[in-house]
Image (cartoon, rainbow, N blue to C red):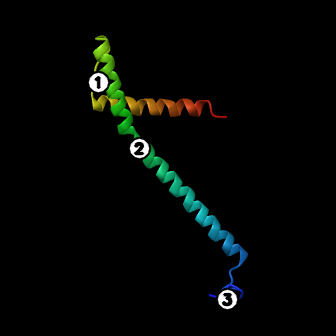
Amino acid sequence: MDFNKPPTVTTSRDRARRRSADQRRQAEGAAVVVGCVVLIAAIPIQAFILMLVMGAAHGAFIAVPAIGYGTSVLFVLGLNMAAGFIRRLFRK
């Protein structure tokens, strides 16, 4: 390919801008999808860690109830929802 010659196919500036805007929108959409997948994948890990912490607290203090994995998943979902609600309240 000879880079000294101008390209034979010319595109209008509007078409090039439209194409770059489409590519930017696709990249933003991909970033949103990746973020959602990461947040959803983090829920079981957070729930497992919460279950272990509550089990350790139950071993040290009998007044602390031991919770299972399902209950810890529900706690994590509820805490995430509460954090999102509070964040939305204080958003400027």
For residue 67, which numbered disc appears in the image? 1
Q: Residues within 10 Å of mark 3 (few under 14, many from 20)?
A: few
Choose top left, top right, bottom left or bottom right for residue 86. Answer: top right
Looking at the rendered structure, the kind of residue marked 3 is: Thr
> Distance from label 2 to label 1 (Cα)?
21 Å
Instruction: Give the labeled residue for mark 2.
Output: 40
| Place of residue 19 in the rendered image (x, y in percent of width and height, measured from the top left) | 62, 70
Looking at the rendered structure, the kind of residue marked 2 is: Ile
Which residue is depicted at the point 56% across and 60% down? Answer: 27
Quadrant of the image containing the N terminus: bottom right
SS for tag 1? loop
Disc 2 to disc 1: CB gap under 8 Å: no
Instruction: Give the labeled residue for mark 3.
Output: 8
> Distance from label 3 to label 1 (Cα)?
69 Å
Which residue is depicted at the point 59% across and 30% down? Answer: 89
SS for tag 3? loop
SS for tag 2? helix
Disc 2 to disc 3: CB gap under 8 Å: no
Q: Residues within 10 Å of mark 2 (few under 14, many from 20)?
A: few
Which residue is depicted at the point 65% across and 69% down? Answer: 18
In-front residue for pair 49/67:
49
Which is nearer the N-term, disc 2 or disc 3? 3
